[in-house]
Image (cartoon, rainbow, N blue to C red):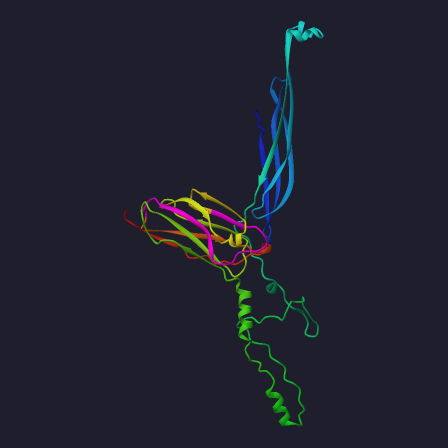
Amino acid sequence: MASYVDVGLKLDVEPTIYLDGEVAIKVALEVSNIISQLQTKSGTVAYQIGTRTAQTVLRLKDGENQVLAGLINDEDRRTANKVPVLGEVPIVGRLFGNQADDRSKTEIVLSITPRILRNVRRPDASVIEFESGTENSLASRPSAGPALPVAGAAAPATAPAAVPASSSAQQSSIGSNVPSAAAPAPASSITTANQVLSGSATVLRWQGPAQLKVGDTFALQLLMQSDQPVVSVPMALAFDPRVLQLTSVVEGDFLRQGGAQTNFTSRIDPSGQILMTGTRAGDTGASAVGALATLNFRVAAAASPETQVQLLTVAPIGPGGRGIVAPLPPPHTLRLGPN
């Protein structure tokens, strides 16, 4: 009965994604090859296999590159051809044969770059902190300022001041200065609380033509504006490959605001999906309105009266790996007419 053994390159990768935008990767690399062939006593053939292994754990940021090396193989080989008997004579035997020495050295280098398409957003500190204790002993984590009222909640009642019962006029005067329990909170405080609870005001929208015909080429831009600084934007888009042919993807000027250096990568899937990631160098982010990317298409066929290009997912990241909420824009609809 024959048995089979896998020989070659084997790579096992196990990623773990953290809320701060970092990825821990367990990497196990194994390289094996046949060293020699052996003949057993029963007449069967066996193979001697040499194996090199390396195991490590990497922790990288989204888009950060790491190179894993060190699997080096040194091979020395000596080959001799000589005439029987005469080639065995010391010194003189070299005249009746030849000898060749070969040495080879190989090294396997592995380059790893993790990409996070969408991560879980970390809640704000004001949401996950709460007061605890009893009525007489109340404890909470110290905050930077007074707590903000939640929109729609009634203001806490203020206890009336104690006044002497003998002076009704004084009691009436003091009571008129006590704040009403139903008095609404200042408008500025409610606005700030709403902003904290609802997330950042990040807007994404499409810019491009709406009426086309077969054979036309056009450019479609995805614009972005945010009230919070953005340092990285991974996203995924989709289109109908039966109707549209994507010719190129060009990085926009949003992340390059202020002359910052950026790293932009894109991958096009034949099924009609585009995976893109833009990363801005430095600690400062971009916020003013600008184009994330420009998609250049050609209308290949009019399989239906209209087609759409839509943003499937987007996960903007701010300084320090903090996630930013970004609502998806409506799909961009293209109406297709005759030639």
223 with respect to 213 (left or right)? right
Q: Is 285 within the magenta?
A: yes
Expressed as whole percent of the image width and height from the top left, the position of residue 285 reads 55, 56
Considering every residue shown, the one lying at the far front of the view is 259
Q: Quadrant of the N terminus?
A: top right
Q: Is residue 234 above or below residue 10?
A: below
- Left or right for 302, reference 319: left
Residue 299 inside the magenta-drawn segment? yes
Comparing 124 with 15, the one in front is 124
Q: How many numbered marks have been drawn onto this rendered protein structure?
A: 0
Q: Is residue 85 in sight in this rendering?
A: no
Image x and y of residue 314, in percent: 49, 53
* Nearer the observer, 283 or 67: 283
Q: Residue 248, located in which quarter of the rendered image?
A: top left
- Image: 30 above or below 230: above
At a point 71% along the width and 8% down the height, the residue shown is: 91
At x 53%, y 54%, the residue is 258
Q: Which residues are magenta?
A: 275-303
- Residue 230 in which image quadrant: bottom right
Q: In x, y percent, where is residue 55? A: 65, 38
Q: Residue furthest right?
A: 90
| Residue sticking out furthest to the top | 86
Residue 197 visible to an observer of this rendering: yes
Q: Position of residue 59 (x, y in %)?
A: 63, 46
